Amino acid sequence: MAMHLDEQAKQLGDAVSIITVVGTLANLLPAIAAILTIVWTAIRIWETDTIQSIFRRNKEKTNADGR
């Protein structure tokens, strides 16, 4: 059940992020909102399976090379 709530929180954060971007582009919100949106979006991208698999793969190559 906790997993379900986490997903709902992420979806809510994504919706707020989109609204913030639109508001910022329309000059309705201050620049700090844009910065927070960029941070949130970067976190969400970092959490994706694709990005995590890329970094895992690079880490495994580095460990195999002994570096």
Image (spheres, rainbow, N blue to C red):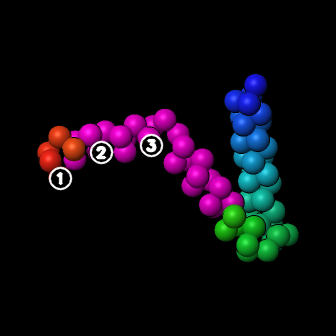
49 inside magenta stretch: yes
Do labels 2 and 1 touch, CB within 8 Å?
Answer: no
Residue 18 position, x and y percent, is: 74, 52
The amino acid marked with disc number 3 is: Ile
**In the displayed structure image, the side of residue 44 where residue 21 appears, left or right:** right
Crowdedness of circle 2 by 10 Å Cα count: few (<14), some, many (20+)? Answer: few
Instruction: In the rendered view, tell whether residue 14 sits above or below residue 5.
Output: below
Q: Measure the alpha-carbon separation of dots 2 and 1.
A: 10 Å
Which of the labelled discs sits on residue 67, or is there none? Answer: 1
The magenta span reads: 37-62
Classify residue 9 as left or right of residue 44: right
Check the image and report above or below for 31 versus 25.
below
Tell me how far mark 2 sits from mark 3, CA to CA.
12 Å
Residue at 37%, 45% in the rendered image: 55
> 2 or 7: which is nearer to us?
2
Identify the residue position indicated by label 3 in the image: 51
Residue at horizontal 45%, vertical 37%? 50
Tell me which numbered mark, 2 or 3, is placed earlier along the sequence. 3
Mark 3 Cα shell of 10 Å, populated few (<14), some (14-19), many (≥20): few
Q: Label 2: which residue?
A: 59
Give the camera-side residue of 31 and 9: 9
Task: Count the labels in the image.
Answer: 3
Residue 1 in picture, x, y percent from top left: 76, 25
Residue 53 in the image: state x and y as whole percent. 40, 37
